Amino acid sequence: MGAKEEIKANERFEFGENWAKFLEQMDDERIAASMLALKSMLASTSLAGKRFLDIGSGSGLSSLAARKLGAKVYSFDYDPQSVACTRELKRRYFVDDDDWTIAEGSVLDKEYLTSLGQFDIVYSWGVLHHTGAMWEALANVDALLSYGGQLFIAIYNDQGGTSGRWHKIKQSYTKGGKLKKALLLALVSGYFNSRRLASGLLRHCDPFYEWKQKESRGMDLRRDMVDWVGGYPFEVARPEQVFDFYYQKGYTLTRLYTAGGGHACNQFVFEKKV
């Protein structure tokens, strides 16, 4: 069963539809924020001469950022509409560019992955936990990274029982009709916004500053909220689980940014030792 069939059967959230709406708000500030996030986590001001693989390219923003930083980029996504979004960004900024390839594919398809070769940087932000087979996906990326290369992934933090409740909400949203989806989105948005407002009052700051400044990898608050409520399939992992998983494969952790025990993603940059 492919992505279209899974979406039709209410087994998968329409990630691509959400990203298509996000592209309406794409601008230079968002692109610059995405470039800054890549440079910061990869500890590099340029990706010139690097082969960059974007697994689950979504809107295509991170692929665009990597290309603007000089990388030779290969982007793929399981969702056809996400592939279309990435192609649209290429059309806008790098039309007819031979150093940016975009395709439809699955990180769970080993035969397809074998055809790709190896890359200096393998990037997958907030994607592998939506495959329905997260640990298999985490294992599959190993063959894609060249020795000495960098693996940059982001995986939802495991909050125990709280994560279990979020799983039920996401599943319910994905399987629900329009009215149910609208109600769940309103309830969850109200929950998070009230927490932001309370936090802002306590710290005497603007609770939405980060989003107004477009500093969160160039993303949009509304689209991120829809992605969070509807993001299904949904799996999680504790930071130490991901660390141990790659440590046993000979990787070294070079950078870690945790969710601080919250519901967001833990971000990891690993180096594959020679």
Image (cartoon, rainbow, N blue to C red):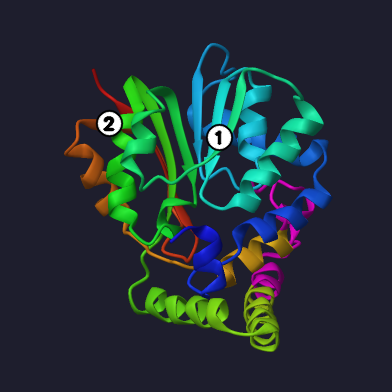
Residue occupying image coordinates x 62% and y 44%: 83
- The residue that label 2 is drawn on is 252
Q: How far apart are labels 2 and 1 at the CA level?
A: 25 Å
Residue 112: image x %, image y %?
39, 37
On-image quarter of the N terminus: bottom left
* Of 115 and 195, the residue lying toward us: 115
State the quadrant of the C terminus. top left
**Is residue 62 something one can see in this rendering?**
yes
Question: Residue 36's quadrant in the figure?
Answer: top right
The residue drawn where x is 79% and y is 54% is 212
Question: Would residue 270 be visible to someone looking at this image?
Answer: no
Residue 227: percent from the left, percent from the top?
A: 61, 64
Q: Secondary structure at mark 2?
A: strand
* Mark 2 vs 1, N-terminal side: 1
Q: Quadrant of residue 134?
A: bottom left
Foreground residue, 83 or 159? 83
Inspect the image, locate mark 1, and give the three-letter code of the amino acid beneath it: Ser
Which range is magenta? 196-220
Measured as percent of width and height from the top left, residue 88 is found at 75, 39
In this view, the mark in front (2 or 1)? 1
Q: Which residue is label 1 attached to? A: 75
User: Is 212 in front, or is 234?
Assistant: 234
The answer to whether residue 11 is above or below residue 58 is below
Residue 86 quadrant: top right
Does 215 appear in magenta?
A: yes
